[in-house]
DNA sequence: AAAATTGTTCATTTTCAATTGAACAAAACA
DNA sequence: TGTTTTGTTCAATTGAAAATGAACAATTTT
């Protein structure tokens, strides 16, 4: 059926779809969060399915993910069996998830790799003349610096 | 044909493939840059095709992109018609590209969207009771803050 | 001028993650 | 007890982005 979205809902959904896509998260996550973000009332899964015209499967998984992130909060409504949700104000949780799941594993894991690469690149000759080795050493510094800045950025974004 | 990669090359390629994938860039970009990063000599396109066992098309496009970013530098080799490249030490250029092409457009464009959303959400009633409006206003602050922090991060990463 | 070399473009194919929807489970209700 | 409601799971499908490779252009060599 054709979903009936208000202008506000449509705008919000667009906004958050593009938001989560930058972070490499599926579109449906952005749709669901966008819908909840401008909803006055808690929404249940079947309302999400109906409004967004997506499958039960997508809605179920999307809600589970967002709930896991703490980006939406489960609300119990008296006399209704369905689980309802409201958007948490802390959008930063979504960004945090990106840092913690995608960026940080790469960065920590990356340092070991660079060490291994430096070993392989070391040919015993004059380090000054070993250009690949110089690049690796420089990259190691740079990556360490990057890794150290993550907690700062996270803290900065959290204090909303 | 089966490409003949040294351990170092394989490790470097792996590293940069995962690196660029975090930023939402195609794998081939990571492969090419990874190969050049640990090469002592400038490489030409056909060498890249041969080593990585990728198509001419991918190599051509990938090299053009990396050259555009300034992540690899064109080198002329006397007596050879082919254009050769070396990896620039400034890996940060790749990250910069992510900021400038993906993040910043979203963020600036996002502020206007939030203004529009605030207008749509404003029902003329008491703002204290308009929860969606409160969320939008809070998000606007948060996003402005995020946008302002980008130049700082960029500067921090650049000074390698 | 013909042939070979180098590189680009872009329609088609491939790949892989996101989405679907049917089957299933669990709980509430009649 | 059987039925309805609510929600999850996962094999199959879809869709979007990347990779391919053939056709083409431009340049150099013979």
Image (spheres, coloured by chain):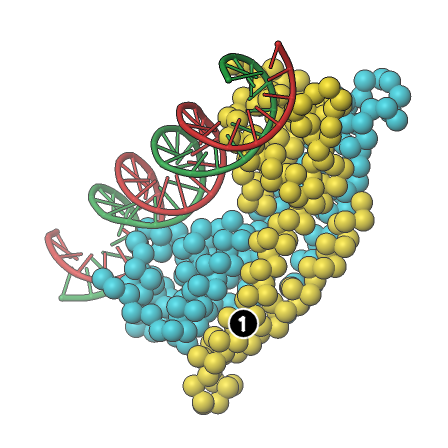
Chain colours: A cyan, B yellow, C green, D red
Q: In this picture, is D14 found above or below B57? A: below
* B72 or A5, nearer to the observer: B72
Image quadrant occupied by the C terminus of chain B: top right
Q: Closest to the observer: B54 or A127?
A: B54
**Residue A75: percent from left, percent from top:** 42, 68
Q: Is residue A155 left or right of residue A27?
A: right
Q: Residue at coordinates 60% horizontally, 40% vertically from top-left? A: B65
Residue on which the image places disc 1: B112
Is residue A155 in view from this perspective?
no
**At x 72% / y 59%, what residue is drawn?**
B151
Residue sitting at x 75%, y 41%: B90
The x, y position of residue A149, in whole percent, is 74, 52
Q: Is B131 placed above or below D20 here?
A: below
Instruction: Kindly give the residue lying farthest to the bottom in the view shown.
Output: B125
Q: Is residue B47 left or right of residue A1?
A: right
Q: Position of residue A37 (x, y in %)?
A: 46, 69
For residue B76, above or below residue B152: above
Q: Would you say B119 lies left or right of A156 here? A: left
Residue B54 in the figure: left or right of residue B88: left
Q: Chain of mark 1?
A: B
Q: Quadrant of residue B74?
A: top right
Q: Is residue B60 visible?
A: yes
Q: Residue D12 is drawn in which quadrant?
A: top left
Q: Secondary structure at mark 1?
A: helix
Q: How many marks?
A: 1
Residue at (45% x, 90% y) in the render: B125
Above or below residue A97? Residue B1 is: above
Residue A45 spot, x, y in % from top left:
33, 61
The 10 Å Cα crowd at callout 1, few under 14, some 14 to 19, many 20 or more, is: few
């Amino acid at each position: 059926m054709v979903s009936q979205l208000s202008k506000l809902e449509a705008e919000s959904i667009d906004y958050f779809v593009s938001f989560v896509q930058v972070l490499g998260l599926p579109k449906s996550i952005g749709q669901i969060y966008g819908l909840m973000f401008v909803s006055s009332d808690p929404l249940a899964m079947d309302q999400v399915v109906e409004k967004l015209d997506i499958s039960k499967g997508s809605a179920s998984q999307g809600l589970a993910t967002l709930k896991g992130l703490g980006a939406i909060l489960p609300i119990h409504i008296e006399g209704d069996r369905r689980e309802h949700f409201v958007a948490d104000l802390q959008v930063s949780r979504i960004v945090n998830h990106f840092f913690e799941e995608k960026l940080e594993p790469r960065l920590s894991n990356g340092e070991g790799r660079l060490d291994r690469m430096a070993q392989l690149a070391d040919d015993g000759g004059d380090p000054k003349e070993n250009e690949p080795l110089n690049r690796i050493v420089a990259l190691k510094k740079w990556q360490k610096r990057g890794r150290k800045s993550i907690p700062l950025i996270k803290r900065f974004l959290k204090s909303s």
